[in-house]
Amino acid sequence: MSEFLTGHAKAHTNIALIKYWGKADSNLILPTNDSISLTLDEFYTETSVKFRSDLKQNILTIDQKQQPTNKLKRVNRIIKHFSDMWDGPKFAEITSDNHVPNSAGLASSASAMAALSGATMKATQTKLSLKELSSVARLGSGSATRSIFGNFVHWHRGHDHDSSYAEPLESPAEFKINMLTVVINDQPKRISSTNGMSNTAQTSPFFKEWTNTANQAIDEMKQAIKSGNFSKIGEMAENNAMQMHATTLSSNPPFTYFEPDTLKVLQIIQQLRHDGIECYATIDAGPNVKIICQNNNLNQIKNSLLSEFNENQLIVAHMGPGIKIY
Ligand code: PMV
């Protein structure tokens, strides 16, 4: 019997090129704008879910550390979503390991919630398509919606649970891009993405404009991905990230995720571009900069960064695969 109660999954994290920033429905986690991301090979979460009839609540262990039960709101939600559909046990023992290079300072909620959804689906023997699974992962964390699929992914904002899902985007087979992460600070962020987006939505006069501009950018970004137009993808991603961060600076009270070293990296990127080396920046709700680049320029970009940063602050990731459920 017990093998029917157990499921495993491995999901990779993703970085948005057109960011999700703002909720239209904070309970269902429906975003105000569509987003597009790149799944990365280097960072992933492996999760096992084992339903046990002797449990009265879920137990979560992350990287060998048992988590306080009052911190499991989103995890409980995913488990309940599936366990409501069956007659089996309602609670599970969940073991999750994050494979993120030491001190990468990267959020793992996208890969974690995607892996949890996949493993729970398997443990409860529920049959969902990957598209349907992406909607369930969304209930754990918005960005997890996109971590169900590999490479380039589009999250449709939708208007209810079923219509807010992700799907993979096609790009030319030979087209490859990298993300070089510059780790500036590996501590948890002071303002969570949930609070950050809620503050800006409520107080920034630019928020509506951000939403419209991001939604309008989707078709053009899809076209750039389809044709493998690196320059267009990079330019649009950098613009979109700066527009998102402009909403934090224009909030009341104002705030920023940037640190002095964040600006230092942006200046290095601008200088590299000025010197004819193509690379672009994207930044999430934290100070670390991800540099979008191609193989041929990787060494030169790294060398420029090494004048200001250490080798162990630089992590290169490539395009990564979709979820594996077993
Ligand atoms: O999924 P959350 O709640 O961690 O929000 C992610 C928000 C950003 O990383 C800033 C943008 C994105 O689309 O991933």
Image: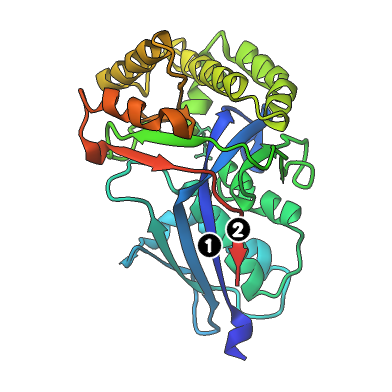
Q: Residue at x 63, y 46 (%)?
A: 145
Q: Residue at x 74, y 25 (%)?
A: 223
Label 2 secondary element: loop
Closest to the observer, 250 or 116: 116
Q: Residue at x 42, y 27 (%)?
A: 297
Closest to the observer, 59 or 270: 270
The amino acid type, in three-letter code, at marker 1 is Lys
Q: Quadrant of residue 256?
A: top left
Label 1 secondary element: strand
Q: Does residue 267 appear to the left or right of 13 in the view shown?
A: left
Q: Quadrant of residue 281?
A: top left
Task: Classify mark 1 as within 8 Å of ligand 1 or not, answering yes or no.
Answer: no
Q: Does residue 28 appear to the left or right of 16 in the view shown?
A: right
Q: Does residue 101 appear to the left or right of 208 in the view shown?
A: left
Which label was assigned to residue 323? 2
Instruction: Name the spot of residue 273 as percent of width and height, x first.
Output: 43, 13
Can residue 254 be seen here? The reply is: no
Q: Which residue is mark 1?
A: 10
Q: Are marks 2 and 1 in contact (CB under 8 Å)?
A: yes
From what the image shows, is residue 160 above or below residue 208?
Answer: below
The N terminus lies in quadrant: bottom right
From what the image shows, is residue 159 above or below residue 97?
Answer: above
Task: Classify mark 2 as within 8 Å of ligand 1 or not, answering yes or no.
Answer: no
The amino acid type, in three-letter code, at marker 2 is Ile
Q: Residue lying at the far front in this picture: please name it.
A: 296
Instruction: Name the spot of residue 109 as percent of width and height, x first.
Output: 48, 48
Q: Residue at x 72, y 34 (%)?
A: 157
From what the image shows, is residue 135 above or below residue 234?
Answer: below
Instruction: Name the spot of residue 180 as percent of width and height, x first.
Output: 40, 34
Q: Dot 1, crowdedness within 10 Å: few (<14), some or many (≥20)?
A: many
Instruction: Name the spot of residue 146 as percent of width and height, x first.
Output: 62, 44
